[in-house]
Image (tube, rainbow, N blue to C red):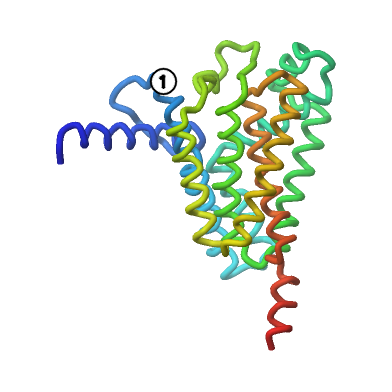
């Protein structure tokens, strides 16, 4: 292997580990200080991190479902995801609803979103999305497939917003600020390739196309909503985008016939 090839592989490995350390509680150490530019480039692997989170959650479900009722296995899978990510995205979801619900001006909304205290809007939104997630996963015939696909694709949707939206925040020390630089086309392609590969592995072509159409439309809604509220996005907005996209994927899979009832009906028609 040529030295320049090895350097490139080492650089990509560093970016992947950086993405993993940013979005999960997995302990990762680096031999040198990480720059803001590297963190920005690491966004290309956020979908890979989503795949990792989905696989871990799915593994927890598979182990638990072998000995426990499905409903409990789903709860344990959700708990595994929360522990692995430190509820990073859920926190963004709650903060976004607190800000958008409690603030009138852009400055007020950003101030509320920075507040570490959980408000009524945020608490209500958090309860609703966790209940929706639980009910949807219980209703799906294959939570394993759903967890892997949804955790991957939802991060594609959320991260892609960096590509064509402006970053807005009052806090210059924001953890997400290094990501504020526009996502490069190369990073966007890697992000999309990861999402497409995972989707085509688990779903037939027609279902992938329908799911992509739904997510493209939902991304447009998110983009319009964030721009209308703030004139751009914040790190909390990206967390909200990930959580809401994950729910949209679960619900879309149910509508596409991946629920237990849908599969039972299909099998009955075949027999």
Relative to 132, say whether 6 is above or below.
above
The residue that appears at 57% across and 48% down in the rendered structure is: 151
- Image quarter in which the C terminus is found: bottom right
Percent across and percent down for residue 223 are 69, 30
Front residue of 75/100: it is: 100
Residue drawn at the location 57% of the way across and 17% of the way down: 174
Which of the 4 quarters of the picture holds residue 147?
Answer: bottom right
**Residue lying furthest left:** 2
The image position of residue 230, as x and y in percent, is 73, 19
Element at label 1: helix
Q: Could you say which quadrant of the image residue 208 lies in?
A: bottom right
Please give the name of the residue rendered at 64% of the width and 15% of the height, measured from the top-left corner.
Answer: 169
Where residue 121 appears, as percent x and y from the top left, is 82, 30
Q: Which x, y percent locates residue 191?
A: 48, 40
Residue designated by label 1:
37
Judge whether 27 appears above or below 164 on screen.
Answer: below
């Amino acid at each position: 292997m040529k030295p320049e090839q090895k350097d490139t592989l080492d650089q990509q490995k560093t970016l992947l580990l950086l993405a993993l350390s940013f979005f999960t509680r997995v302990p990762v150490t680096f031999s040198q200080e990480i720059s803001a530019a590297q963190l920005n480039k690491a966004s290309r692997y956020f979908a890979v991190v989503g795949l990792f989170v989905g696989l871990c959650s799915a593994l927890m479900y598979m182990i638990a479902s072998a000995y426990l009722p499905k409903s409990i296995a789903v709860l344990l899978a959700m708990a595994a995801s929360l522990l692995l990510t430190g509820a990073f995205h859920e926190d963004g979801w709650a903060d976004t609803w607190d800000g958008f619900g409690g603030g009138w001006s852009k400055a007020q909304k950003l101030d509320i979103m920075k507040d570490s205290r959980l408000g009524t809007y945020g608490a209500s939104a958090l309860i609703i999305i966790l209940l929706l997630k639980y009910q949807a996963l219980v209703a799906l015939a294959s939570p394993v497939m759903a967890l892997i696909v949804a955790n991957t694709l939802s991060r594609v949707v959320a991260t892609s917003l960096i590509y064509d939206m402006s970053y807005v925040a009052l806090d210059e020390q924001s953890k997400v600020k290094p990501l504020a630089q526009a996502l490069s086309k190369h990073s966007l392609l890697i992000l999309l390739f990861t999402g497409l590969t995972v989707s085509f592995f688990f779903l037939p072509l027609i279902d992938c196309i329908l799911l992509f159409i739904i997510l493209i439309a939902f991304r447009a809604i998110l983009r319009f909503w964030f721009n209308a509220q703030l004139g751009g996005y914040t790190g909390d907005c990206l967390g909200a985008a990930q959580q809401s996209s994950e729910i949209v994927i679960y619900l879309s899979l149910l509508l596409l016939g991946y629920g237990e009832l849908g599969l039972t009906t299909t099998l009955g028609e075949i027999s």
